[in-house]
């Protein structure tokens, strides 16, 4: 892609995050590296415990510490190193350049303040608007995220809104300071499918309108297929594949990515006798195998896989990368996009 | 169908996890050592190994500290040290009896109340708790002492019949929470009777609350015993820190503090150690951190 | 499927479950939440009815009302023709043996202080089935049936992952050899790769043991794999009911169509027109007049706002496809 020449908006290099637990130190992310370019929507996909949420939090400097700790690596945002930045500076970045929305909007909104109160608070503090201006701009934002009758809704309290509406309010708040990067952690998981469709559509629309990059953290590959340009697949704290959506869905290279794709429940014209599965289960983060973490469950694994951790390396065409000793071959037909 | 691999699962029960956490809490461990030490003393007294001479008149009036009488003697020449040691047993006896019975009663009534919340059963039990809680404690004890014709257990009865409401309210709240959980619904679905559900599925999951509540009741009982004995409503037959402090009220006027100090310091040590133990226990058993 | 005697294993007739809402100083009943509002269906032996709908549509309440975990407000629940609504405790016991439930949340559905063996044995203990030895043996068999080894019998639920716990929950439900199981969102709390494992297990049990299921889910993709028939629920009522084949190939109700089009498709090249519904589900405390769906329906007409649509059969006599929509007239 042409963007490859431009410096990335966000660059994560060899990031290692550890958490101290009662049973020992757990590595939540192990040497992960990826770039996010301006204006692109990237999905980070994986199952629970794969480290995707921790990755999102680390970009904003929100790793709870203790027990969490960034042990190594760097996160650069617009050329600026974020690891080790003082809390004061980090707060400015969170307020102005990077925003985040969470899975459960109810817990992220303060129940005793009205929507308007919480929205204008940010604007007054970070942008020096007057109360009047802040209120007008908050109403405008609510209208932009598709809330009907925003002038009326702004005085309501979080519990008066439905789940979908609350998530829209969260998005409005996140966008009120015009961020360059929006991190959305499972933004639609708590919502019904019909509401999910509304919210995802809104996020895509706003991404174009605000010229921002979006990192969508999700377990749902269907959501990724519909909203993202590129996807990063994580397993057990490591990135196993980082590829454009077209390539990933047409011909996944990593066996885990393929297994995950195959096991997505989907409406099929002909019902299958048995759904495809990934055998076994995710290894305990405290007792990781020495080699590839997927080796035990992998149909292509051999002796090398259980000894040596595969590196994330370019997998041929374009910017795609895969961490596998024996990846599936890339299908040429799919790379014509 | 292949068998699911379970090799990586670590074995640990909720209790062993709590125990591990407690063992790493330094304050908790030190206070536990203190509590155990007091308990050994109480045990020794019960078995007749310690402080057998607590009621003997052996020395002169108000003797000072010496190798024979470590804390000196009281007005009529009894050994203050022996009396203070003997009182430890009294405190433990009252504390244990009251804490165990009040917590057990509170647990059962609280569980029934919570399980049937919203029905008349709960209304009646809540009303009963409200009534008991609103009677001034010392008046209530005086009434019971009078009604029981100065029985040595009047104090126990009074404390048990008022202290259970605290555990009961806590358990009731927890049960209302647990009652809505799916494993309780599952028990209904397989046909477990209501009593079976309360005793097999709900109460066992409130043990962390009960344990902590029992230690709190224990401390409350010891403190109340001292005050009641001081007022002449408590221990009749035997010795207690409260009685020693009551005795000392005349001595303090005369400038002799040994009796007062011995009783106060020993009581303070036990109550303090037990409170700290109770806090550490609460932290270790906190289900949000344990499970 | 079973005999020719026309009696379904389970028949639900006009089932209603309202929850009173209290308010005011005297805690009087102010209004009612119409969680399940007149639902009827049949399930034959060994078949599965999938019940799909969004949160708050009453599908879980319906499942629990059928097992009388919530006492129904009105209506009939017939098991082999016998109405179990209002059956006294003593006689309900036998019926309980015939129907069981699998829950959504594998972390809340197992008692945390009981071992796996105790949990699976409990139904046998309660109903006094077999000797102590036989029960122990049965526990091992049940564990094997759900793909787990006997060595886990003395472990506690919190030592297992979500998928494993769900298997233990299924073993408990199987202990009494029920004819009918309500599966309430059994895979929605699980990771994608584990979901399919559990779905395959349920499909296998259904086939091998001839157990009938009421499979409740919010996910049309999940429910397709295990169901023979599908009922679509909206605001406490079934709005469309058809065989799996008919429903997925030709959904009739605008709500079913919208639900289907809202599912994200894991294929970036597939571009399709999506029906995005406006607004939110109305409150079941105060459902709209006329067709319940008219407030969000992209095709709503005037009569939809005033007249309640009747349930019509748009299929054939032998292969019915029922739908409650004015547009099908």
Image (cartoon, rainbow, N blue to C red):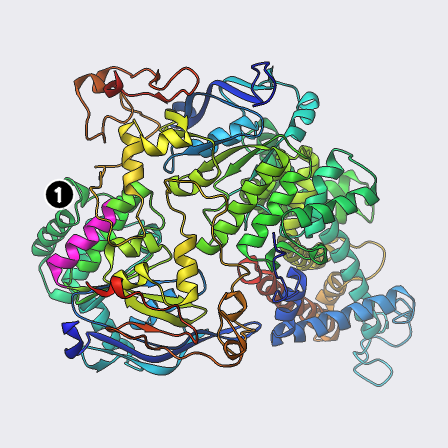
Res. C68 image quadrant: top right
Camera-side residue of B47 and B233: B47
The extreme bottom residue here reads: B67
- Residue B125, given in percent of the width and then of the height, sits at 62, 34
Residue beneath label 1, please? A151
Q: Residue at x 71, y 65 (%)?
A: B249
Q: Is residue A62 magenta?
A: no
Q: Quadrant of the C terminus of chain C?
A: top left
Majority secondary structure of magenta residues: helix
Camera-side residue of B55 and A121: A121
Q: Can see residue B164?
A: no
- Residue B5, given in percent of the width and then of the height, sits at 61, 61
Camera-side residue of C32 and C38: C38
Q: Residue at x 71, y 73 (%)?
A: B34
- Residue C174, given in percent of the width and then of the height, sits at 65, 39
Q: Residue at x 66, y 74 (%)?
A: B29
Camera-side residue of B120 and C92: C92
Left or right: B265 as drawn, with respect to C258 = right
Left or right: A140 as drawn, with respect to B190 = left
Res. A81 image quadrant: bottom left
Q: Is residue A205 magenta?
A: yes
Within 10 Å of disc 1 (Cα), the crowding (few <14, some 14-19, many 20+) is some
Q: Residue at x 41, y 48 (%)?
A: A265
Q: Which residues are magenta?
A: A198-211
Is residue B39 positioned above or below C266 on the image? below
């Amino acid at each position: 892609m042409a963007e490859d020449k431009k410096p990335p908006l966000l660059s994560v290099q060899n990031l290692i995050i550890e958490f101290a637990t009662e049973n020992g130190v757990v590595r939540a992310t192990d040497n992960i590296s990826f770039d996010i370019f301006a204006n692109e929507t990237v999905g980070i996909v994986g199952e629970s415990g794969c480290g995707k949420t921790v990755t999102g939090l680390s970009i904003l400097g929100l790793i709870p510490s203790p027990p969490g700790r960034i042990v190594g690596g760097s996160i650069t945002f617009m050329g600026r190193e974020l690891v080790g930045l003082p809390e004061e500076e980090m707060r400015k970045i969170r307020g102005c350049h990077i925003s985040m929305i969470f899975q459960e909007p109810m817990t992220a909104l303060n129940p005793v303040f009205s929507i308007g109160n919480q929205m204008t608070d940010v604007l007054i503090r970070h942008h020096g608007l007057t109360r009047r201006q802040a209120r007008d701009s908050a109403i405008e934002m609510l209208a932009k995220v598709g809330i009907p009758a925003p002038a009326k809704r702004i005085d309501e309290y979080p519990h008066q809104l439905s789940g979908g509406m609350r998530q829209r309010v969260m998005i409005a708040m996140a966008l009120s300071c015009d961020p360059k990067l929006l991190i959305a952690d499972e933004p639609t998981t708590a919502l019904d499918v019909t509401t999910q469709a509304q919210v995802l559509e809104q996020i895509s629309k706003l991404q174009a309108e605000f010229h921002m990059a979006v990192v969508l953290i999700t377990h749902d590959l269907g959501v990724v297929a519909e909203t993202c340009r590129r996807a990063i697949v994580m397993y057990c704290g490591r990135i196993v594949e980082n590829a454009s959506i077209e390539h990933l869905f047409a011909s996944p290279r990593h066996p885990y990515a393929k297994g995950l794709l195959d096991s997505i429940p989907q409406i099929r014209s002909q019902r299958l006798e048995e759904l495809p599965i990934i055998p076994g289960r995710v290894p305990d983060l405290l007792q990781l195998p020495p080699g590839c973490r997927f080796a035990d469950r992998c149909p292509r694994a051999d002796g090398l896989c259980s000894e040596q951790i595969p590196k994330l390396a370019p997998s041929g065409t374009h910017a795609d990368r895969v961490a596998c000793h024996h990846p599936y071959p890339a299908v040429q037909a799919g790379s014509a996009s | 169908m292949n068998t699911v691999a379970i090799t990586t699962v670590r074995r640990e029960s909720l209790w062993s996890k709590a125990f591990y956490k407690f063992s790493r809490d330094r304050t908790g461990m030190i206070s536990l050592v203190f509590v155990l030490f007091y308990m050994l003393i109480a045990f020794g007294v019960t078995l007749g190994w310690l402080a057998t001479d607590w009621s003997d008149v052996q020395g002169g009036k108000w003797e000072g500290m010496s190798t024979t009488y470590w804390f000196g003697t009281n007005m009529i020449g009894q050994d203050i040290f022996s009396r203070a040691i003997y009182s430890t047993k009294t405190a433990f006896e009252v504390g244990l009896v009251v804490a165990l019975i009040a917590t057990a009663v509170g647990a059962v009534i609280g569980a029934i109340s919570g399980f049937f919340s919203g029905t008349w059963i709960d209304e009646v039990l809540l009303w009963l708790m409200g009534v008991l809680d609103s009677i001034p404690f010392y008046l209530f004890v005086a009434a019971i002492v009078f009604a029981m014709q100065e029985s040595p257990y009047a104090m126990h009865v009074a404390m048990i019949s008022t202290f259970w409401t605290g555990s009961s309210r806590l358990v009731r709240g927890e049960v209302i929470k647990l009652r809505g959980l799916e494993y309780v619904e599952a028990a209904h679905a397989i046909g477990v009777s209501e009593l079976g559900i309360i005793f097999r599925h709900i109460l066992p999951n409130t043990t962390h609350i009960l344990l902590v509540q029992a230690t709190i009741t224990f401390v409350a009982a010891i403190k109340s015993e001292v005050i009641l004995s001081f007022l002449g409503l408590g221990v009749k037959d035997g010795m207690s820190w409260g009685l020693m402090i009551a005795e000392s009220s005349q001595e303090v006027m005369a400038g002799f503090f040994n009796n007062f100090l011995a009783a106060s310091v020993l009581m303070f040590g036990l109550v303090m150690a037990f409170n700290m133990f109770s806090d550490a226990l609460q932290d270790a058993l906190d289900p949000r951190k344990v499970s | 499927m079973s005999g020719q005697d026309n009696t379904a294993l389970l028949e639900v007739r006009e089932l209603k479950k309202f929850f009173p809402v209290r308010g005011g100083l005297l805690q009087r009943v102010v209004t009612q939440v119409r969680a399940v509002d007149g639902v009827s269906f049949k399930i034959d032996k060994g078949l599965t009815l999938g019940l799909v709908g969004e949160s708050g549509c009453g599908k879980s309440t319906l499942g629990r009302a059928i097992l009388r975990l919530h006492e129904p407000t009105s209506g009939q629940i017939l098991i082999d023709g016998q109405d179990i609504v209002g059956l006294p405790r003593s006689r309900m016991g036998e019926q309980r043996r015939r129907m069981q439930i699998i829950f959504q949340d594998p972390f809340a559905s197992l008692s945390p202080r009981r071992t796996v063996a105790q949990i699976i044995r409990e139904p046998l203990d309660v109903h006094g089935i077999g000797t102590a030895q036989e029960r122990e043996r049965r526990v091992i068999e049940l564990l094997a049936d759900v793909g787990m080894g006997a060595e886990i019998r003395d472990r506690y639920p919190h030592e297992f992952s979500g998928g494993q716990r769900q298997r233990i929950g299924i073993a408990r439900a199987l202990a009494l050899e029920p004819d009918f199981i309500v599966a309430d969102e059994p895979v929605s709390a699980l990771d994608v790769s584990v979901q399919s494992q559990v779905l395959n297990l349920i499909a296998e049990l259904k086939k091998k043991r001839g157990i009938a299921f009421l499979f409740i889910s919010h996910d049309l993709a999940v429910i397709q794999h295990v169901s023979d028939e599908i009922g679509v629920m909206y605001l406490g009522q079934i709005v469309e009911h058809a065989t799996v084949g008919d429903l997925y190939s030709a959904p009739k109700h605008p709500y079913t169509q919208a639900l289907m089009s809202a599912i994200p498709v894991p294929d970036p090249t597939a571009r399709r027109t999506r029906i995005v519904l406006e607004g939110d589900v109305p409150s079941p405390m105060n459902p709209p007049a006329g067709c319940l769906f008219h407030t969000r329906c992209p095709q709503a007409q005037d009569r939809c706002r005033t007249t309640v649509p009747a349930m019509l059969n748009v299929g054939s006599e032998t292969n019915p496809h029922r739908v409650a929509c004015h547009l099908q007239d």
